């Protein structure tokens, strides 16, 4: 089996040895080409010339996001009826949230073993109303604000190998500083938040966590054809701070005012003149007044550890 390893050329030389170890481990099983790309054009060109090679994404959520976007631009993603392309992931990013959702090891050698031997599972993506691709999670409110506030902290803490803690700092600051957003939320055509109560966060998740381990949707199954939806009300400042702290630990279900739903489409609309920012796979998008997110089932097939199956959990229906 030939393999095409996609590596982010902007990652620098710190991962060169690891990339070489991955290449050598894959080379035992077939011919390997390494494509170090630094732009979408370079990535699309590498994918266009891959022939029958299997694509192995070496990186984190941002790298997987870029590859899925490039495949979308090439009209290669599946849609539930048409079978999607095959991918493997070797988690080399900072947070690796999506890889965590499918139980991929952060040990490169073990990840290569899964690429070579692991069964294939169909994996969904989320698409917004501008046709952008989301592989892990998209959210507005505190999570997005936390991402914006975390950016300088991630850079500072990253110099000492503690980059993921930057999101924790940003999340706490967002919980303290923001009073919430007046948003109307519709899930599969049913209004689930009318915009009268301020919301702390609205998210649609394909994976379980964001920001390097902050658990947003603990029961999300990336290949079940549904998105896990989280709606959290913004109440008192202590409650908002508690929500932020619980978000980093994953224990938000027991908090008052937090709802978890499942669905295939979410629409979020601002009820004031001010728009809201959107965080999609860690990318901070420009503020908008409204946005719609839809699940695209079976967009690609992924090698996962044996035993990982998409499962539908018993969550509250949108109505």
Image: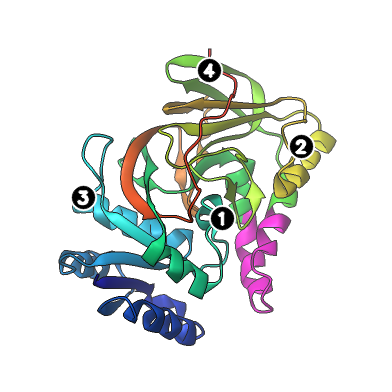
Res 285 label: none
| 7 is within the stretch colored magenta | no
Q: Label 4 crowding class (10 Å Cα cut-off): few <14, some 14-19, many 20+?
A: some
Residue bearing the label numbered 3? 76
Q: First in sequence, mark 1 or 3: give its number.
A: 3
Q: First in sequence, mark 4 or 3: give its number.
A: 3
Q: First in sequence, mark 2 or 1: give its number.
A: 1
Q: Do the residues labelled 2 and 1 touch (CB within 8 Å)?
A: no
Q: Which of 132 and 72 is in front in this view?
A: 72
Place of residue 120 in the rendered image (x, y in percent of width and height, measured from the top left): 36, 51
Left or right: where 195 falls relative to 166: left
Q: Is residue 87 above or below residue 82?
A: below
Mark 4 vs mark 3, CA separation in Å: 32 Å
Query: Is the magenta region chiefly helix, strand or loop?
Result: helix
Looking at the image, which residue is at 42% across and 49% down?
135
| 156 is within the stretch colored magenta | yes
Q: First in sequence, mark 2 or 3: give its number.
A: 3
Residue bearing the label numbered 2? 240
Residue bearing the label numbered 1? 100
């Amino acid at each position: 089996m030939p393999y095409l390893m996609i590596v982010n050329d902007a990652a620098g030389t710190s991962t060169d040895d690891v990339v070489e170890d991955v290449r050598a481990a894959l080379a035992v099983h077939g011919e390997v080409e390494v494509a170090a790309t630094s732009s979408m054009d370079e990535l699309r060109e590498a994918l266009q010339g891959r022939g029958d090679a299997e694509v192995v994404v070496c990186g984190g959520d941002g790298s997987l996001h870029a590859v899925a976007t490039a495949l979308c631009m090439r009209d290669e993603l599946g849609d539930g009826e048409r079978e999607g392309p095959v991918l493997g992931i070797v988690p080399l990013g900072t947070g690796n949230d999506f890889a965590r959702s499918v139980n991929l090891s952060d040990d490169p050698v073990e990840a290569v073993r899964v690429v070579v031997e692991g069964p294939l599972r169909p994996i969904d993506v989320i698409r917004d109303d501008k046709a952008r691709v989301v592989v892990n999670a998209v959210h507005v409110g505190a999570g997005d604000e936390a991402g914006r506030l975390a950016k300088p902290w991630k850079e500072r803490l990253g110099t000492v190998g503690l980059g993921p803690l930057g999101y924790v700092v940003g999340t706490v600051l967002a919980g303290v500083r923001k009073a919430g957003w007046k948003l109307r939320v519709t899930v599969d055509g049913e209004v689930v938040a009318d915009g009268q109560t301020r919301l702390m966060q609205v998210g649609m998740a394909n994976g379980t966590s964001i920001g390097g381990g902050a658990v947003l949707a603990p029961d999300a199954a990336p290949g079940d054809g549904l998105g896990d939806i989280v709606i959290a009300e913004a109440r008192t400042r202590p409650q908002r701070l508690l929500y932020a702290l619980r978000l980093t630990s994953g224990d938000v279900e027991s908090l008052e005012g937090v709802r978890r739903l499942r669905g295939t489409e979410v629409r979020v609309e601002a009820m004031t003149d001010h728009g809201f920012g959107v965080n999609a796979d860690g990318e901070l998008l420009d503020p908008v007044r409204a946005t719609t997110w839809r699940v695209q089932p079976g967009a690609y097939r992924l090698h996962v550890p044996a035993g990982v199956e998409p499962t539908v959990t018993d969550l509250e229906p949108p109505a």
